[in-house]
Image (tube, rainbow, N blue to C red):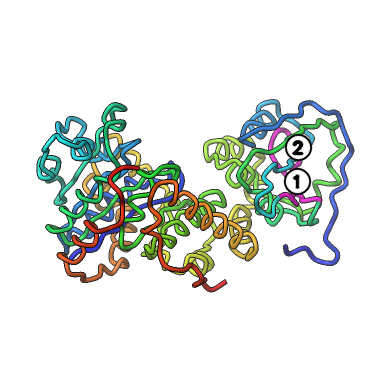
Amino acid sequence: MVEAFAVASGKGGTGKTTSTLALGMALAEEHDVTVVDADTGMANLLFHAGLDDAAVTLHDLLVEGTATAVSEATYDRFGLSVVPCGTSLAGFEAAEPGRLREVVAELAGDTDVLLLDSPAALGSKSAVLPVVLADRVVVVVEPTIPALSDGLKVQEYARSYGTETAGVLFNKVRDDAADVAEQAERRFGGPVLANVPDSDAVRAARRAGEPLLAHAPESEPAASYRRAAARLDVHDRDEGAVADRFRSAVVPDTP
Amino acid sequence: MTGTADAPELRIPRGDLLRSRVVSDVGTSLARALDRELTGYATLVPQETLLLESDARGVVTFADGVPVLAYNTVSDSGGPDALAELAVPGPYRVELYAVGDGALETAHEEDALRVAPGAAATELADDQALADRTRDAAPDERLDAASDDDGDAVAAFLEDDERIEAIREQARSEAAERASEWGLDDALAEGDGDEFDG
């Protein structure tokens, strides 16, 4: 079985990468999980996962003719399979976004859950592809009007491509924030997976180059992410069919 | 929005124009007011015309640089409701005015128009650092009085059917338009008529 989730927000700074790795580690207690940094223009998952010096990354897989195998860019870290993305502009420019489909198809053949850490903006083909390819989207938002507006926008993009909503993750929630979960659930048509509190533990984990659930597993935000993962309710899907779907996703190789 | 029949109006002296600018980020203007400890007000006119918000003209008043009241002169909404209506993507035309000491005291007694000290920075400028800085500068009684007002604006936004539908509609048409641009037409889902509740 495999299900692919895009972790998206429509804007930067909402904690997508922290959330992707935290959900991944929580889900890894029951599933084989593969996390992909699909933010090919502004990759940062490698810094969160202690993979700063990864020699082969997603960028290499997205360049035609390098014959790099997907397995070479896949690293076992923190109980997850992690496919980081490089940070060089040259790597980004050489990458062909359409090839992400092939990479995702191959990864789908060998995992239970695929998490695609998605770009912040929606302004390019490479930015929108993770949302196109995923089965469901997890919308990460701070409980503010600008963030919710962008979250609604990314959800609508996802719906346009037939990608359902797994839920909304409220992140960086402050003590005095009002509880708008019920209204948000109605608006997004999906559950609020958790209210993850604003916390120094998250910043400390980031500085340490470790995922939150490795760095501070007993912290309050870590517990929130575990609750969120439990609510995701991963669907059983036939992995062959999913891989085929990715391969046949009507994404031309050239933009 | 949710204005009531006897909704209070905002009456403030005109004051002296300090600055008039079209800004992409209202945070610039809020930070300027904070840094110069402005007692006065800002008028905000969103330049966005695609959504409904061309109807919003806002006034945010300041006491010693910290926002006190928010008011939408088009809808006559005040407080968090007004902030929610004004919280649209930029740019805005912003004018900053200074008024004499004490000239806003009467206006500032109108609780119904009040907003939390950091709410304008959070909801209009999407700037938590500025919101923190503003809260630090606010007198204690303001912090005690209005701890939930940020959330009130978010709740008002989530209750605004027309606004949410406008965001969705714009995103749908943008997605469709870009799908053809990027050769993703065939990946678009069939039909888009199934609406969520609300």
Spatial separation of the CA atoms under disc 1 and disc 2: 8 Å
Residue A131, percent from left and from top: 36, 54
Q: Chain of mark 2?
A: B
Q: Amino acid at mark 2?
A: Ala
Q: How many marks?
A: 2
Q: Residue at x 17, y 60 (%)?
A: A29
The mark nearer the N terminus, 1 or 2, is: 2
For this rendering, which residue is in front, A229 or B93? B93
Q: Toward which corner of the image does residue A5 lie, by quadrant? A: bottom left
Q: Toward which corner of the image does residue A23 lie, by quadrant? A: bottom left
Q: Residue at x 67, y 45 (%)?
A: B48
Residue A119, percent from left and from top: 37, 44
Residue for badge 1: B58
Q: On screen, A223 above or below A81? A: below
Q: Is label 2 in a helix, a strand or a loop?
A: strand
Visible residue check, residue A70:
yes
Q: Residues within 10 Å of mark 2 (few under 14, many from 20)?
A: many
Residue B60 included in the magenta stretch of the image: yes
Residue B67 included in the magenta stretch of the image: yes
Q: Amino acid at mark 1?
A: Gly
- What is the number of the mark on residue B42? 2
Residue A50, percent from left and from top: 20, 36
Q: Is label 1 in a helix, a strand or a loop?
A: strand
For this rendering, which residue is in front, B127 or A201? B127
Q: Chain of mark 1?
A: B
For this rendering, which residue is in front, B147 or A74? A74
- Whether callout 1 and callout 2 share a subunit is answered yes
Q: Which residues are magenta?
A: B54-73
Q: Residue at x 19, y 55 (%)?
A: A105
Q: On screen, B93 above or below B88? A: above
